[in-house]
Image: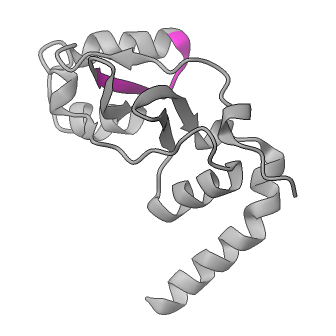
Amino acid sequence: MHQRPVADIIRHEALRAAPAETVLDVARRMAGRKDSCILVCDGDELAGIFTERDLLVRVVAAGRDPAATRIDEVMTPDPDSVDSRTSVADAIRRMDECGYRHLPVVDAGRIVGALSFRELPLVEKAHMQPELDARHALAERMW
C-alpha cells in the first residue's frame, strides 16, 4: 500500500490556545468547532495539548471550576508529535502503541495541525488492523 504522508490528510488548521486561557473559554471554542483537542502554544511553540478526555478527567471529575482553571494547569505538557512527512501508517502505529487519540503535527518547530484517530482514513486503519491486532495479542500474552 502507498505510504502517503500525514500532510495529505490534515483537513484544517488545529485549534490553538494560550497557556493562560481558561478551560471554559477553550472548551467553548472546541465545542463551537466540534474539535476534540486544542494545541496549547507559548508563542509559536507547542507547549501542550488539551483534549476532551482531559476535560472529563482533569477538570470535571476532579471538581475543578472551568472558569477559574487555566488550560496550562490541566493540559498534557510537551506532547509527542510527528512531522508532516510521517506516513499515515507510522502515525497510526505511534497512536496505537502510545494510546494516543490525538497527535500534533509539527515541522521544524512550526505547528502544522493535529491528527485525531477517529478522523484517520478508514482504508489505512483497515489495512493496518491485522498488524494492530497482532501487536495487541502479543502484548496480552506478555502480561
User: Going 39% across and 17% down the picture, which residue do you hit?
Assistant: 16
In this rendering, does residue 37 appear at all?
Answer: no
Instruction: Name the residue rendered at 39%, 48% in the picture.
Output: 80
Q: Position of residue 127 (x, y in %)?
A: 82, 60
Number of numbered discs visible in the structure rendering: 0
Q: Quadrant of residue 15?
A: top left
Residue 17 is left or right of residue 20, and the answer is right
Give the x, y percent position of residue 11: 67, 23
Q: Residue at x 43, y 88 (%)?
A: 143
Residue stretch in magenta = 33-41
**Measured from the top left, where is residue 81 in percent x and y?**
45, 44
Lateral position of residue 86 relative to residue 58, left or right: right
Q: Residue at x 50, y 21 (%)?
A: 14
Tell me where residue 106 appears, x and y as whole percent. 47, 35
90 within the magenta span: no
Name the image quarter holding the N terminus. bottom right
